[in-house]
Amino acid sequence: MLPVNQAEQLILNLVQPLDGGQDGETLNLLDASGRILAEPITSSLDFPHWDNSAMDGYAVRYADVQGCAAETPVTLTIVEEIPAGYQPQKTIQPGQAARILTGSVMPSGADTIVIQEETQREGDRVTIFATPQPHAFVRDRGAYYQAGNPLLPAGLRLQAAEIAVLAAAQCAQVKVYRRPKVAILSTGSELVAIDQPLQPGQIVDSNQYALAALVAQAGAEPLLLGRVPDQPKALRASIQQAIAVADMVLSSGGVSVGDYDYVDQILAALGATIHIRAVAIKPGKPLTVATFDRAKDIENKTLSSKKDLVYFGLPGNPVSALVTCWRFVLPALRKLSGLAAPWEPEFVSARSLNMLKSDGKRESYLWGKLRLVNGEYEFESAIGSYSSGNLINLAGTSGLAVVPLGETQILAGDRVQVLPIG
């Protein structure tokens, strides 16, 4: 069994990201929300576009107002009103000022803003009662960004702030990575559809739904290939279909050591290189990770990418399938999708509200609720048994607490590393 961290790094080393040129598509900006930039963005605009005021007040020459105070105010003549969107027409001369509003263009000759609260206006005259700092409340052209420099890097996920920046830079269209295609299939003769009456020994294929939701939340496109009985011929056909149409494959079940666990031998027969067969993690010990060299498959014309495909044979127990996805598949998907590094999970330190137990033989992941309380993370374990088949108490999970290999308990009140979920 591989240690968890070694398995993580091995998997990430196997994943080859989508190619920004070959696997990119151009979208209108509003359609690009949540997508990942496939090429860096530069702009021909300076930000700010011009020198402007950061406050409502008066644009003045600092030389005219230095040293003034409530006892020794300075009175200036107002020669112009500068609202937003107006191009100043006057040059500020000694003894003059311009009324200016937030965001408005600075007039020539002025170098400082006196805020409105420190002035008193009468007609075309304004009296200054306090000395501002030199250059106060002036936003210089290009202070935030200078035209021609990198604006946004490739590999960045476009969320509200990035969309706003691109809109301000007049980028009506952007090139993003296409969504990775992830084939999902469930193995097991006991599995039935969600709307099928249950017979003794049968269970609903919940993994298909869980994995599809997780893949979609990660920004990829789930390809649902359904349920496959524990029959080598049928399983081989389904795996062949999956590797022909997808960038990554997730199958659940059939990777343990039972009489009807055929996934590994079929992968080997199809020419896959199997890199991982088991990981020292609980739940999720039986985990197969394999790759297919599709550069040799000259008949595969379905995908634009001929990069190696990574195949995850996940355990069939529903909790194990989700835990291994959160721990190993999501980081791999982040790298595959073109997202910039780091791809590894980010853990937080939390105070455990409960005693957490493990047998110490594997790195154990215990699910529960992670909360931020008064600036400190707290972890509350789920109610009920920690069983890989107990899907019920997995609902509402927002964190996985880690009991390290070799440790058997973490006391209530002690610190614990937690992987945030969602």
Image (spheres, rainbow, N blue to C red):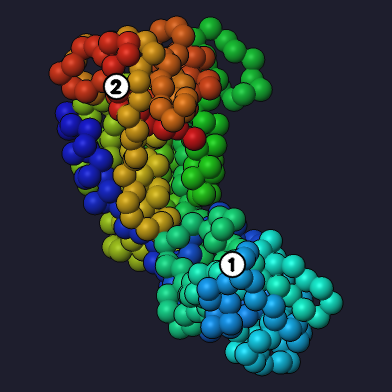
Q: Residue furthest front?
A: 71
Kindly identify the amino acid type of the residue bearing the numbered disc 1: Ala
According to the picture, the residue beneath numbered tag 2 turns out to be 415
Q: Position of residue 397 (x, y in %)?
A: 48, 23
Q: Residues within 10 Å of mark 1 (few under 14, many from 20)?
A: some
- Of the pair 68 and 87, the residue shown nearer to us: 68
- Of the pair 53 and 249, the residue shown nearer to us: 53
Q: Position of residue 70 (x, y in %)?
A: 63, 64
Determine whether label 2 and label 1 are within 8 Å by CB.
no
Q: Residue furthest right?
A: 123
Q: Nearer the viewer, mark 2 or mark 1?
A: 1
**Element on which disc 1 rests:** loop
Q: Earlier in the sequence, mark 2 or mark 1?
A: 1
What residue is at 22 percent from the left and 44 percent from the top?
9
Q: Position of residue 38 (x, y in %)?
A: 46, 67
Kindly identify the amino acid type of the residue bearing the numbered disc 2: Arg
According to the picture, the residue beneath numbered tag 1 turns out to be 69
Q: Position of residue 31 (x, y in %)?
A: 64, 61
Q: Is residue 68 above or below residue 305?
A: below
What residue is at 28 percent from the left and 10 percent from the top?
411
Cα distance in 3D space between marks 2 and 1: 56 Å
What residue is at 64 percent from the left and 20 percent from the top?
196
- Of the pair 35 and 267, the residue shown nearer to us: 35
Instruction: From the viewer's perspective, tell me whether residue 238 is left or right of residue 31.
Output: left
State whether residue 407 appears in this view: yes
- Of the pair 208 and 273, the residue shown nearer to us: 208
